[in-house]
Image (cartoon, helix red, strand yellow):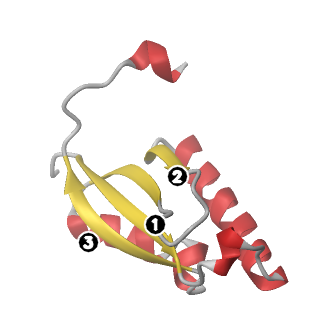
């Protein structure tokens, strides 16, 4: 069995107006599906952290840090994200190494 590796995927909105103005009904529905998907991954112990920047301009982005046994497994998780699958957000995957982690701050 391969060692568990961490990956980060960076998400950016396909349409900046989704965050700078307001989402369309389709975007809002997909973002709800995205949140439910990430919640499920968190409950399964796959997703370690997810969040987004608070700016609402072209520089906004979100990140998901996850555990996966391989890059292909991480890509599958990323591509199955409803926001990516429905092209509401674009995603880019990176291998990631956690150097320090403060467990007490996470509680």
Whichever of labels 2 and 1 marks the residue nearer the N terminus, that label is: 2
Which label belongs to residue 26? none
- In the image, taking residue 67 as reference, residue 5 lies left or right, namely left
Q: Alpha carbon of mark 2 to alpha carbon of mark 1: how far?
A: 9 Å
Q: Alpha carbon of mark 1 to alpha carbon of mark 3: how far?
A: 28 Å
Quadrant holding the C terminus: top right
Mark 2 sits on what residue?
Answer: 53
Which label belongs to residue 72? 3
Query: Taking 107 as reference, is 97 above or below it?
Result: below
The image shows residue 91 at horizontal and vertical percentages of: 41, 74
Q: Look at the numbered disc 3 and give the secondary structure of its residue.
A: helix
> Marks 1 and 3: which is nearer the front?
1
Which label belongs to residue 59? 1
Q: Alpha carbon of mark 3 to alpha carbon of mark 2: how far?
A: 27 Å
The image shows residue 67 at horizontal and vertical percentages of: 33, 48
Q: Choose between 85 and 17: the one closer to the eye.
A: 17
């Amino acid at each position: 069995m391969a060692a568990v590796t961490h990956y980060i995927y960076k998400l950016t909105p396909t349409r900046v107006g989704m965050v700078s103005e307001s989402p369309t009904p389709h975007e809002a529905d997909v973002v709800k599906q995205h949140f439910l998907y990430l919640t499920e991954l968190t409950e399964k112990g796959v997703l370690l952290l997810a969040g987004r920047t608070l700016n609402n301009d072209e520089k906004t982005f979100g990140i998901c840090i996850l555990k996966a046994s391989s890059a292909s497994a991480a890509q599958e998780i990323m591509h199955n994200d409803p926001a990516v699958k429905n092209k509401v957000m674009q995603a880019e995957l990176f291998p990631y190494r956690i150097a320090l982690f403060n467990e007490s701050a996470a509680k």
